[in-house]
Structures are given as C-alpha cells and as structure tokens.
Image: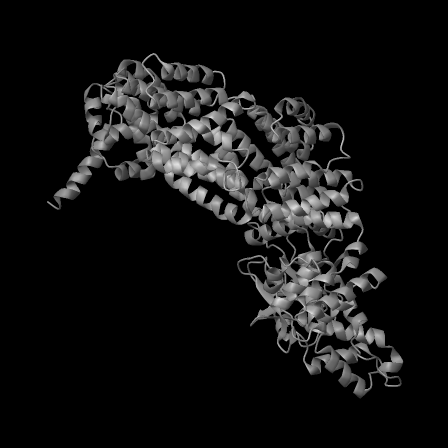
C-alpha cells in the first residue's frame, strides 16, 4: 500500500522508543539545513518498524509519502511503486521510471515529481524490494540532492538481517524489545477494559518484551481469558501466535535457508546430546542436514545475518521465538507431518550418535511431498547458483536433476537445464558428464534435437555426423532474438570451428541481453563473446569484452565467469608481452579454477603463463608447463583445448630438446587437423612439422624448407596474423641459422611489423634480435624514410630522448606515465632499426627532423644540468 499524509493525523502511540523517536525528530526537523537526510530503521518481525514509519509520517510537518514493498518483485517494481505513490494515476510514472534508469538516476526523477516542498519518503521493508530498485535507490542516496533542490528526507525500514547500503551521513537505529513498563502500557492500549493483573504478568513474561508477539497473543485470547474468567492456553504464546508474527518473514527467506533452520530447530528440540544449554552441536546439525538432504551452504549466511549464533561449536537461534516459529510454520498436511516426523527421528538418532540408523531414517516423504516441477525448479535455481559461484560439477548434478524432473512438464525450463548442465560439465572438462546432459533430450525436437545430436557426435569425434546438425543450429538459432538460443548457436559455431560466425552470433546475444536488461545473463554472454573473439585472433577486442565481462561478473557475484575472463585477459597479455598482467590475471583465474573445478579456465591460464615464458625465452620452463595440458585424462588439459595448445608445446619442446614428446603430440595433432574443424590447424601442423624437421637436420632445400613454405602459404588463407607472425619468426630464424641472412630478413621484418602492430612487445624484441643478427635494419643502419613511420607522439618522445631527457622527464613534459614513455620508445627503436636511445642522436644528426620540440628537450636537459651543477 502507498499513501500520502500531510501531518494532520497523529501517528500511533509508541513505547520505549525514545531514542528512535529522537532520530526521527532530527530527520524531520524543518529547520535542518542541507536536506536529503536518510534514516535507516532495522528490526525483527513484529518489533514495530512499520509503526515507527506511520508515526513519523503522521508527525512530519510537510507532505509524507509511505511506500510499502511491492507485491510482485520483478525488476524495477519498487521504483514503479515509488513513482506511483508520488504521482498516483499520473501518466508520468513510465517517463519517471525511464529517467530513473538514465544518467540522472532516481534522484532526478524523485526531485522532478516532488518539486521544492519539504517531503518525507517512508519506504517500508527495503529487503523485499527488487534488486534493481534497491540499486537505483542506493545510487540516489549516495549522490544526494540535486544542486538547488532541498531533496526529500528518507525514512527506510529493513529487516534486521538485511545488509544496509553504505550511504555517507545516513543514521541507523535498531529497534529492540520493550521493557516491562512499556509492555504493560502497550497492553493497556490494546485492551479495554484492562486485562486482569495475573494475565498481564503472564503475558508480559511470555512475550519477553516483543511487541508483535504481545499484540498477536492478545488478539487470539478473547475477552473472557483476558479478564481472567477463563484459563489461559498453555503456552499463551503458542505456534499460531508465532506463525502470525514470523510467517511472512519466513516465507521470504530462501527455501534452503528455511530448511536448514528447521534442521537446527528440530535438533534443539529432540536431541539429547546435541541440545545443550548453549545451543545445538554444529556437527549434529551438519549430520542432520546430510541425512535429510538439506544443503548446508546457507549456514554461514544465516550466522552472518544474525539469525543464528555460532560459538564454541554450538548453534542457537539469536531470537528464541524464531526457532519456535520455524517449527510452527511448517504446513500441516499428512506429507509435511511425515516429513517433520522423519526429520525429528533423524535428528534424535544423530544426537544419540546412531548415524547408521539416521541414514535409514532420511525423509523420502519430504521429497515425494513436493510436485516434480517444484523440485525441478528448486534444483534449477541451485544449479544456477553453483554455476555462477561454486563447484561446477555440483552445478552439473543439480541441473541434470532439474532437467530430469522438468522433462515433459516444463519443456522450456528443461531445455535450459540441459544446456546449462552441459555448460557446467564443459567448464569442468568432463566429456562423459556433457554426454549425460545431452542424453536427457529424448523429448526434444527441431533445432534443439539438432544441437543435442550434433554436439554429442562432435564430443565423440564423429564430425561428419556433427557438421550438418550443428550447421542447421547456427543457421536457425543465429536468426533468433532470444539470447539463450543465440548462445546455443554461438557454441555450435565454435564446435564447428567457425570462429567468425561464433563471434558474430555471440555479439547478437550480448546485444539482446542488454536490450532486455538480462543482468544475470549479461556476464555469460560477455564470457562467450570474449572467448569467440580470442579464438578468432581478435585479441584487442577480446580484451575489451573480457574487461567488461569481468566487471559485470563481479557486480553480480559470478566468480566462475570472472575466472574465465581473467584467463582470457591473461592469454591476451601473453600476446602483448605484458608479463605482469599475465601473472596477475592467470593467478586470479587459477585461484577460483582450482577450488571450483574449472578445467577450461585453468587450461587457458596455464597456457597463457607458458606463452609468456616462451616469449621471454626460457623454452624448458614453457615446455614443462605445457606438457600436462596436451595429455588426455584427469590430470591433463581441457578436452576442447588440448589440441589448440599442441602447436605451442611442439615449439617449446623442440627448443628444449624434448623432440620425442613433440613428435608424439604432432602426430595426434595431425589426426585432429584432418577433421577440418579448425581453420588454422593445417598451417600450424605444417609449422610443427617444419620445427621437427629443423631439429632433425632438414637440409637447405629439404623437408624443413618445404614445411615452412607450406605453413606460410596456408596461413594466408586462415587469418590470425599473430600465429602467422610466429611462423614467420620461426622460418626466419631457421634461414638465419642456415646462413641465409638475406632470405631471412623478409620473414623476420614481416614478423616484427605484425608483432608491433599487435603490441606484442616480447615477441617483437625476439624478432628484432633475430633481425639484427642477420645484419639487416635491426643492425643499426639509419633509414631517414623510417621517421615517417613514427606516430606524432613517438616523434615527440624520440626528439626529447635524442636530446638526453630521461623517461621521467619526458613523462612530466608530455603528461604521460614513465611506463608509457618506455613503451613508445621500444616502438621507436623497432621502426628506426636501432637498439637503444644511445643511437637516437645519430639518427637526428643524420638529417631526421629535430626542430619541433627541440627547444623543449633542451629546456629539460639544461634544467637538469643546472640542478647537477648546484647553485651558482
């Protein structure tokens, strides 16, 4: 409900709330300056949060709007309820909601509707508002009132366990229980005539100062019992009273949290060894949860939220009424009674140490009591949570179970569960688990049938059978607008080796996810797109997408997606030669991958580390790191990445003298290349054969020369300039070693230019070193025409460096970082064909332009000289 008052109706009478009312008075003070004050009020169920808001609204000297949590928690429902309360029935609500999503946020929209009058906005039950609205409100609170506007006062209530947003200047009050005098005064307000004295004493004692419990108990007793003419029920505060007070709170808790609270409550009520004066033994609760198939993951959250207290190996309810309410709130159907009885027997058996009996006392009735669709959706939610931030094979099991339960009952959800179960198994590197998920689609038809059959054929290396089915998926789903179907089509394109189509389809999936505000799906869409761009050799675009995906994953708590994006960024950094970035991103990826079983992310991260090591020279270390990745089995690399790693391993292994292992890996790679699902494979296979032939002494016009030529020729038709440059570098190095420096310079120059264009500094240094060794441009011959290849920024830096300015002095003059200056200087050296800054003055002296910026450089040098000379 929403409504507006204007201070004419007094609010309800409150007791023992002096501190809270003082905080409200400070918020409502019309003489206060600055405006836009915020007061958060927290408390448990029935402790008077809504009553305090009503009192504040009634006492406020201006207009006061009260907005309850919306009944339907769809995105932006809270913001819609707020705007509807401010402008009831007005067509401005839609426009205001659009404004709230824009740059100005909720603050601008609210200010536009309120005008300049002093206004109090009372928002009840913040914890029940949808996440979008809470985020928009938090942004508005942190931003404060708009310039020139007083801004509304905000009085916001939330459950005690809700984590309030950090807002500078906000005040928080926490409602507590009433004292005996306050409880008696409340009873006097509730009852006319006043209850009999013995009844008052008993109710005050039983309610323990809880105002909501007191009100509910009085409502259920009736006049005769209150007057003492009829005996009170035993106990006066029974399950019905507690259900009335706590029932709504419990309904809004996640199902797994409610189930775990029930296990704790049952163990405390039935156990002898488990239930102690300080609480229930944690081990007994965990055993009871396992026996009743209750997830224990919510336990830490329940303790952190203050619903349970854990100390000295014991658990107890922070609010004893909550424990009793948990037991009382369970439905009373025969199935639920059987479930509760079974859970109680299990808890009791565990408390007596009879674990073997407890295993047989699990509650099958609890499982049978729920409809299959309900159970399926519960598993689907649990699987999604684990897929985002948990062990992926746990996610696979939950999603597999969801697909089984939903099959034939909720086809669309069953289809999603199958695809997500396959994705979880794929991330975990388990082919058999992937096939198990695909095998649940017996009732699927049309495009989904093609996807299931095609992917199953590909996973069993029957690519002739897989190709037509997956091609139809790409053609059909790639034309859809549903982002889920687009992700499926993009995955099919990747399996076919059509990386360009995969990037295109995944880009469409991302666009649709954004247009539909699919916040939870957005990180996955960005993950798929970043990987497709990486496979297509678009490294800079992959890095940009991965960085955006990393931010989206961190915002939504999807650590598994974040790990994959870190792995992509590590691989891109291994191309550019940024060793620090490789180590940082690979380390972050592996931290999560190792604990959550992310075989795909772990393989990508290890590959990135090895490529970085190979780019910097130590072939033996790179070969040792890559060797496990190219082997099959539980200790090997990811099944879909092993063959992609082989060319890198062969290069490192040959350089490290591990020729036999390199030859074996190349033989397996030749079988893979013959399947025709990787466009770059023929060129990379030719490079592997050339490297092996070189190590075995292939002659000048022999086997090595032939395979190098084949590799270069085949690269021209398959894209991926970086891999082509690596082949050219290997070819040029071989030609130089065969004492053919003139022939070597062409491939080495082409490789150097490509590496520089890709900002692959480590690889460029390697190519530059090889080029110098041939006596070519890298050897220091000044080429005046090369100056025109420099960018204006590089020319400015080169002039200043030629005059003797240090990197730090250049950075200060051009407002850059010293690291950026160093990066530009390396590019200058490469394009001018020199080895270091010592050769720059000679280049300038050879006739290259030096006038523009020369004065700046001389000024820097002369000022440094003056500092060195000291005061005159």
Tell me the quarter of the image containing the C terminus. Answer: top left
Above or below, comparing residue 49 to residue 147 in the picture: below
The residue at the point 82 percent across, 86 percent down is 196
- Nearer to us in this view, 164 or 169: 164
Residue 471 at x, y percent in the picture: 65, 23
> For the view shown, which residue lies furthest in the top direction?
701
Residue 509 at x, y percent in the picture: 63, 32
Q: Can see residue 820?
A: yes
The residue at the point 56 percent across, 42 percent down is 561
- Nearer to us in this view, 644 or 175: 644
To which quarter of the image does residue 582 belong? top left
To which quarter of the image does residue 153 belong? bottom right
666 with respect to 848 (left or right): right
754 with respect to 85 (left or right): left
Residue 477 at x, y percent in the picture: 68, 28
Tell me the quarter of the image containing the N terminus. Answer: bottom right
- Nearer to us in this view, 310 or 267: 267
The residue at the point 57 percent across, 70 percent down is 313
Above or below, comparing residue 581 to residue 273 in the picture: above
- Nearer to us in this view, 166 or 858: 166
């Amino acid at each position: 409900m929403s409504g507006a008052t204007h201070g004419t109706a007094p609010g309800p009478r409150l007791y023992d709330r002096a501190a809270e009312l003082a905080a409200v008075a400070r918020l409502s003070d019309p003489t206060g300056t600055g405006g836009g004050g915020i007061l958060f009020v927290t408390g448990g169920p029935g402790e008077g949060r809504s009553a305090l808001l009503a009192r504040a609204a009634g006492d406020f000297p201006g207009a006061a709007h009260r907005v309850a949590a919306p009944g339907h928690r769809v995105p932006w429902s809270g913001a819609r309820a707020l705007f509807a309360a401010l402008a009831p029935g007005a067509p401005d609500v839609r426009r205001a909601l659009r404004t709230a999503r824009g740059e100005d946020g909720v603050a601008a929209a609210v200010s536009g509707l309120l005008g300049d009058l002093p206004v109090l906005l009372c928002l009840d039950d913040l914890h029940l508002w949808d996440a979008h609205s809470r985020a928009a409100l938090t942004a508005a609170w942190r931003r404060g009132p708009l310039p020139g506007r007083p801004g509304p006062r905000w009085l916001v209530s939330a459950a005690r366990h809700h984590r309030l947003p950090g807002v500078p200047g906000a005040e928080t009050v926490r409602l507590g229980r009433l004292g005996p005098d306050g409880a008696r005064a409340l009873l006097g307000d509730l009852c006319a005539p006043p209850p009999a004295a013995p009844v008052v004493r008993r109710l005050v004692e039983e309610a323990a100062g809880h105002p909501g419990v007191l009100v509910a108990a009085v409502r259920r007793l009736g006049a005769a019992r209150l007057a003492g003419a009829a005996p009170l029920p035993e106990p006066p505060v029974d399950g019905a009273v507690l259900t009335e007070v706590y029932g709504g709170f419990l309904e809004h808790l996640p199902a797994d949290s409610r189930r775990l609270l029930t296990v704790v409550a049952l163990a405390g009520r039935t156990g002898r060894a488990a239930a102690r004066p300080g609480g229930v033994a944690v081990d007994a609760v965990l055993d009871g949860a396992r026996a009743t198939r209750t997830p224990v993951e919510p336990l830490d959250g329940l303790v952190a939220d203050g619903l349970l207290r854990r100390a000295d190996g014991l658990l107890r309810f922070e609010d004893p009424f909550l424990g009793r309410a948990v037991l009382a709130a369970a439905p009373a159907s025969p199935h639920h009674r059987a479930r509760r009885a079974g859970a109680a027997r299990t808890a009791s058996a565990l408390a007596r140490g009879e674990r073997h009996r407890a295993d047989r006392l699990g509650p099958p009735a609890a499982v049978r009591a729920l409809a299959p669709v309900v159970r399926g959706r519960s598993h689907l939610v649990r699987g999604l949570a684990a897929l985002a931030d948990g062990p992926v094979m746990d996610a696979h099991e939950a999603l597999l179970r969801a697909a089984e339960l939903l099959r034939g009952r909720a086809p669309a959800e069953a289809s999603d569960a199958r695809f997500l179960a396959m994705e979880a198994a794929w991330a975990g590197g388990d082919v058999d688990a992937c096939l198990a998920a695909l095998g649940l689609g017996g009732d699927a038809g049309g495009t989904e049938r093609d996807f299931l059959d095609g992917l199953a054929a590909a996973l069993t290396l029957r690519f002739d059978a897989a190709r037509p089915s997956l091609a139809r998926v790409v053609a059909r789903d790639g034309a859809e607008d549903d982002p889920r179907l687009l992700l499926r089509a993009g995955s099919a394109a990747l399996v076919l080796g059509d990386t360009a189509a995969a990037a295109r389809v995944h880009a469409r999936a991302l666009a649709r996810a954004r247009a539909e505000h699919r916040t939870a799906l957005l990180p996955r869409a960005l993950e798929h797109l970043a990987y497709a761009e990486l496979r297509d050799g678009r490294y800079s675009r992959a890095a940009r997408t991965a960085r955006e995906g990393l931010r989206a994953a961190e915002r939504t708590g999807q650590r598994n997606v974040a790990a994959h994006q870190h792995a992509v960024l590590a691989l891109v950094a291994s191309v550019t030669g940024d060793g620090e970035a490789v180590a940082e991103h690979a380390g972050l990826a592996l931290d999560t991958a190792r604990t959550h079983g992310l075989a795909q992310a772990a393989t990508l991260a290890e590959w990135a580390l090895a490529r970085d090591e190979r780019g910097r020279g130590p072939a033996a270390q790179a070969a040792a790191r890559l060797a496990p990745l190219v082997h099959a089995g539980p200790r090997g690399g990811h099944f879909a990445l092993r063959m992609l790693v082989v060319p890198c391993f062969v290069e490192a292994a040959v350089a490290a003298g591990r020729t036999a292992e390199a030859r074996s890996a190349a033989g397996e790679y030749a079988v893979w290349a013959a399947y025709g699902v990787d466009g770059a494979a023929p060129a990379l296979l030719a490079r592997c054969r050339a490297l092996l032939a070189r190590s075995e002494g292939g002659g000048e016009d022999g086997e090595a020369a032939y395979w190098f030529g084949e590799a270069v020729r085949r690269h021209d038709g398959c894209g991926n300039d970086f891999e082509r440059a690596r082949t050219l570098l290997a070819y040029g190095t071989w030609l130089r070693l065969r004492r053919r420096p003139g022939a070597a310079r062409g491939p080495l120059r082409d490789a150097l230019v490509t590496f520089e264009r890709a900002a692959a500094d480590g690889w460029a240094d390697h190519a530059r070193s090889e080029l110098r060794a041939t006596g070519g441009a890298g050897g220091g011959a000044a080429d005046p025409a090369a100056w025109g290849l420099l960018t204006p920024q590089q020319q400015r830096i080169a002039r200043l460096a030629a005059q003797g300015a240090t990197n730090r002095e250049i950075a200060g003059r051009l407002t850059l970082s010293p690291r950026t200056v160093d990066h530009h200087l390396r590019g200058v050296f490469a394009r001018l064909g020199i080895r270091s800054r010592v050769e720059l003055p000679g280049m300038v002296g050879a006739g290259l332009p030096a006038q523009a910026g020369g004065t700046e450089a001389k000024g820097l040098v002369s000022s440094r000289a003056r500092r060195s000379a000291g005061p005159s």
